[in-house]
Image (tube, coloured by chain):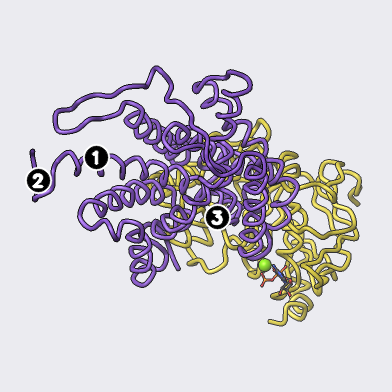
Amino acid sequence: MMTLFGIPTAALFGQLLLGLINGAFYAMLSLGLALIFGLLNIINFSHGAQYMMGAFVAWLGLTYLGANYWVALALAPVIVAAFGIVLERTMLSRLYKLDHLYGLLLTFGLALIIEGFFRQLYGISGMPYAVPKELAGGWNLGFMYLPIYRAWVVFASLVLCIGTWLLIEKTKLGAYLRAATENPALVQAFGINVPVMITLTYGFGVALAAFAGVLAAPIYSVNPLMGSNLIIVVFAVVVIGGMGSIMGSIVTGFMLGILEGLTKVVYPEAAGTVIFMVMVIVLLIKPAGLFGKGA
Amino acid sequence: MRNDNGALLKVDGLEAWYGESHILHGMKFDVHQGEVVTLLGRNGAGKSTTMRSIMGMVAKRKGSVTFEGTETIAMNSNKIARLGVALCPEERGIFASLNVKENMVLPPVVKPGGLPLSEVYDLFPRLAERANSQGTKLSGGEQQMLAIARILRTGATMLLLDEPTEGLAPVIVQHIGDIIRKLKERGFTILLVEQNFHFAATVADRHYVVEHGHVIDMIPNAELQANMGKLKGYLGV
Ligand SMILES: Nc1ncnc2c1ncn2[C@@H]1O[C@H](COP(=O)(O)OP(=O)(O)OP(=O)(O)O)[C@@H](O)[C@H]1O
Ligand SMILES: [Mg+2]
């Protein structure tokens, strides 16, 4: 058996891959949270529930309508985003001028309601969702076995994250978004319909979560609690990366996923807490987060 | 005497509030096509609030503001901007996360007839040199130039300039004076807030004096010297 630093390479790379997969989800989810926080000033606690809804829409579509994985990947984000937009228009939009705490409480309550609803209907045992046949199987790389679906998740997440970053940093639309994050009143006074932009940004952030949910469906079972298990870690990622920093969320998401994976190899007992330990250290040393500006 | 109905911007009985505090108490003045008009007044008189109210940026406001005959008192600021009114705010409002070029082209073109970007850079050559700098890396004077420059290409015909000379060195104040005169020649209509009435006298056609949220006097620029004593009394200088 091959070893590296006394660790079997298959185990090492296996955990690295798992870490990379988790990191891909951390990155996609914290990216949406950062976007929403930047423009709406809302800490979107229902992000995990919206991720779960993405997975459920995929599962329901397949089970009741025969809509395959690819259809779900395209449509679930749109459907869940539409639901998010209704929430934003009817509830969140009333809170923008108040302290972050109100948005947090409202979205936390919404998360509980949404999860409760799915739990009532589907229990918590979890439903399997098959890997689409195009992505079934795997490659033997010699030092490890790489399931194709997992490679796809990492690839799709990278494309999505980099695409979003380019959209925000390199396009006119992104310039409006960055400017409105700084000074929405002035951007509106230049003739931009900022309220519509805010609504669409929330929808986009929610769509990112739902897209991640569909990607997750074949890996983790589709389960009403899948989001709340993940979201706490994702919040730690956002805190470490710096609230509202787009690149910070992406890089931190992947890095912490990998760190978590490596910890599983080196010292498995700490794998569940290593991210929170990093969070504590970062908060002590650089409270604005690794990529954050100001205090 | 001018016919008031011909005014490009007409403000009448304008009241405005920030939360519970009542700031404007019936502002009344007008600005004609092609004029440069100033609002003079002490700190806290309500000059900036008047500008922000015309722009639709103060949520609670009453009375009447018409631009080219269109009533805007109930409009959102993005609609008012689309009519052709643009603000250069007192705090300049340069976006830190955007570079100079991005700041420059951020305000969308709302009407045909704005200055082409090349002409804007001709007026402000410094900004062309600094095009790739981050917005907040500019000096105070450069930020002020950028704040004026970026509203010239939008096609807005009414410019609201809130203290464009505040805190700037005399040569830059002179430069901004030249720019304002050039803009007037180009047919822009300008409402200017100024603390410095010596500067105001070099660019303006008329001056309104604001105190406690309403206009207390109007002085044509030609009569400014004759009214200097009275004006100094108003401004407490
Ligand atoms: N955002 C705000 N919230 C509450 N009160 C405000 C706000 N902005 C201004 N004020 C108050 O409104 C009054 C008028 O302020 P404004 O900025 O219009 O004065 P100004 O004439 O422009 O003064 P300055 O010459 O100092 O710029 C002041 O008493 C000020 O304290
Ligand atoms: Mg002012």
Label 3 to label 2: alpha-carbon separation? 48 Å
The residue pinned by badge 3 equals A182
Q: Residues within 10 Å of mark 2 (few under 14, many from 20)?
A: few
- Rate crowding at label 3 as few (under 14), some (14 to 19) or many (20 or more) other CA atoms within 10 Å: some
Q: Position of residue A188 (x, y in %)?
A: 66, 47
| Label 1 and label 2 in one chain | yes
> In terms of secondary structure, where does tag 2 sit?
strand
In this picture, residue B135 sits left or right of residue A256: right
Mark 1 vs 2: CB contact within 8 A? no
Horizontal and vertical percent for residue B178? Answer: 56, 53
Query: Chain A hue?
Result: purple
Query: Which x, y percent locates residue B113?
Result: 65, 32
Residue A29 located left or right of residue B114: left
Drawn colour of chain B?
yellow
Which kind of residue does numbered mark 2 sit on? Leu
Name the residue carrying label 2: A4
Q: Chain letter for mark 1, please.
A: A
Q: Which residue is mark 1?
A: A14
Q: CA distance from mark 1 to mark 3?
A: 42 Å
In the displayed structure image, the side of residue B45 where residue A132 appears, left or right: left
